[in-house]
Image: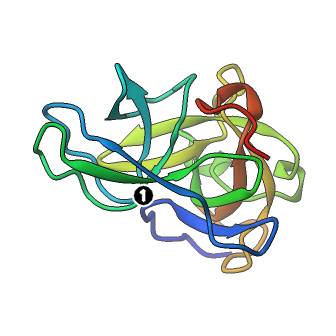
Amino acid sequence: MATITQRAARVANTISGNSPEVKVFPEAASQSFKAGEFVYLVSGKVTVCASNGTVILGMAVADASGTTDEDCAVYIANGDTVFEANIYHSTVGSAVTAITDVGVCYALLVSSNKHYVDKEDTDNDAFQVRRISPKDIVGDTYGRVEFQVIASVRQLGDGS
């Protein structure tokens, strides 16, 4: 088993095989999010999500401009879009991919401009794991998983 480099989250694919849905919204003031971070709308403007986020619009396509009201493209979290991110647990021995992760819901963890699937937090569900990423194998430390944002957390509703 390997220890996988922790990377920015990304869009993995879509259920339909189409391109992921992208919408443009104005950027909120003082944003410094990076591409691959989850965002949501506050007063109609794109703002980075915090750990344990209970509302997710989607994923930033590009880094924040740092300019209020600048156009900001977002991959929309809907019933079609599948994302990929590293799993995380504060106990390294528990931060491994497992076949039993499939179907389980976990929280969002944010650290150093990277967003993770937090195996430690099953109380603040945001993501449901669909499968272990084909880039990694079961038992990898900080391995990647493919997941969807659960319907109750999607800011724009189901969208499927």
Q: Quadrant of residue 132?
A: bottom right
Q: Is residue 129 left or right of residue 68?
A: right
Q: 106 or 42, which lies in front?
A: 42
Q: Residue furthest bottom?
A: 135
Number of callouts in the render?
Answer: 1
Q: Residue 156: give x, y in percent of width and height.
A: 61, 33
Residue occupying the point 29% across, 47% down: 112
Where residue 96 sits: x, y (%)? 68, 56
How far across and down, in percent of the image, does residue 63 sit?
Answer: 26, 58
Asked where in the image residue 56 lies, by quadrant, the reply is top right
- Kindly identify the amino acid type of the residue bearing the numbered disc 1: Gly
Left or right: residue 39 versus residue 151 is left
Per the image, the residue denoted by label 1 is 36
Q: Is residue 146 above or below residue 89?
A: below
Up-down relation of residue 51 to residue 3 (above or below): above
Residue 107, image x, y percentages: 62, 33
Q: Secondary structure at mark 1?
A: loop
Image quadrant where residue 128 sits: top right
Give the crowd class for mark 1: few <14, some 14-19, many >=20 residues within 10 Å.
many
Residue under the image location 77 percent in, 75 percent down: 17
> How is the model colour-coded?
rainbow
Quadrant including the N terminus: bottom right
Residue at x-position 72% and y-position 53% = 147
